Image (spheres, rainbow, N blue to C red):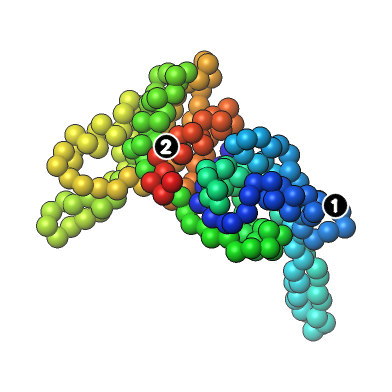
Amino acid sequence: MKSKWINLTCKVLPKSIVNSMLKYPITESVDYGFDVTELDDVKIEASFYEKQVSKQSFRLPNGELVENDILNIIIFDFVFYMVRDGYYILCLKSPPRSIKTFLDKLEMILETQIYVSNMNINITSFIDGVYNIEDASQISIQEILATDLAFDEKSTGEVKVKSNSNALDVLKNKFECGSYLLKSCKIVFFIHGKKVITKVTHSGGIECSNMFEEHLFPILYKTNPSI
């Protein structure tokens, strides 16, 4: 599963969010809609559907102009995680490259302004969160991408480290006194005997096995500095 995590602020209670989405169900006759699939004290799981029609035109060799309608269907799942009144963490599962229309539609049905920002994931804290999972074993940090590394007084750059054990330790050993920003990492480990591969970016992107989904929010909740 590929996911994008963002911070979302709006003056709407969870119950009102659910009621607003239920007013716009997904049917064949609508251009967009929402479907609430699960609701509990922590999260709201739902789906978003949108039908987009664009025109494509081209000319035949004889000069005749031909126009065609191109139908594009966008559908993906998302989760509202409730942090506190008016503040949510939003997980978008396999979203399209642009989520502007989704956010526009969400703001429209909620009838209030929403404010979003990328979640900046602290890679080191995320790794610590994986180590703190009781059922996780054989943890291997196989890739680390670091930037803002100072090579001398006039030179900076980024380094990607690959390792079969702990790429973060390799980086720390090579740049003992240096400061840097971790942009991404790849962690491989096992939960209940099943292999989990997780890739995380500083800008809020996470790709992981489906069985690891339930652990993501607790880790991000503890490591998100904006909460």
Of callouts 2 and 1, which one flags the residue occurring earlier in the amino acid sequence? 1
Q: Is residue 70 or residue 125 the one in the foreground?
A: 125
Q: Image quadrant for the N terminus?
A: top right
Report the amino acid beneath label 2.
Lys
Do we see residue 168 in this rendering?
A: yes
Please determine whether, in this image, residue 3 is positioned above or below residue 164: below
Question: Nearer the viewer's eye, disc 2 or disc 1?
Answer: 2
Measure how far apart labels 2 and 1 are at the Cα level.
Answer: 38 Å
Callout 2 secondary element = helix
Question: Which residue corresponds to mark 1?
Answer: 27
Q: Are marks 2 and 1 in contact (CB under 8 Å)?
A: no
Q: Nearer the viewer, residue 194 or 113?
A: 113
Residue at horizontal 79 percent and vertical 84 percent from the top: 63
Relative to the observer, which residue lies in front, 13 or 205? 13
Residue, x 44% and y 19% (percent of image)?
134
Q: Which mark is residue 101?
A: none
Q: Residue furthest right?
A: 29
Picture coordinates of residue 19, whole percent (x, y) = 75, 50
Residue type highlighted by circle 1: Thr
Decide if residue 34 is on the left or right side of residue 180.
right
Q: Residue furthest bottom?
A: 63
Instruction: Determine which residue is flagged by label 2.
Output: 222
Label 1 packing within 10 angstroms: few (<14), some (14-19), many (20+): few
Whole-percent x, y for residue 109 in the image: 71, 60
Q: Nearer the viewer, residue 214 or 52?
A: 214
- Inspect this view and state whether residue 121 appears: no
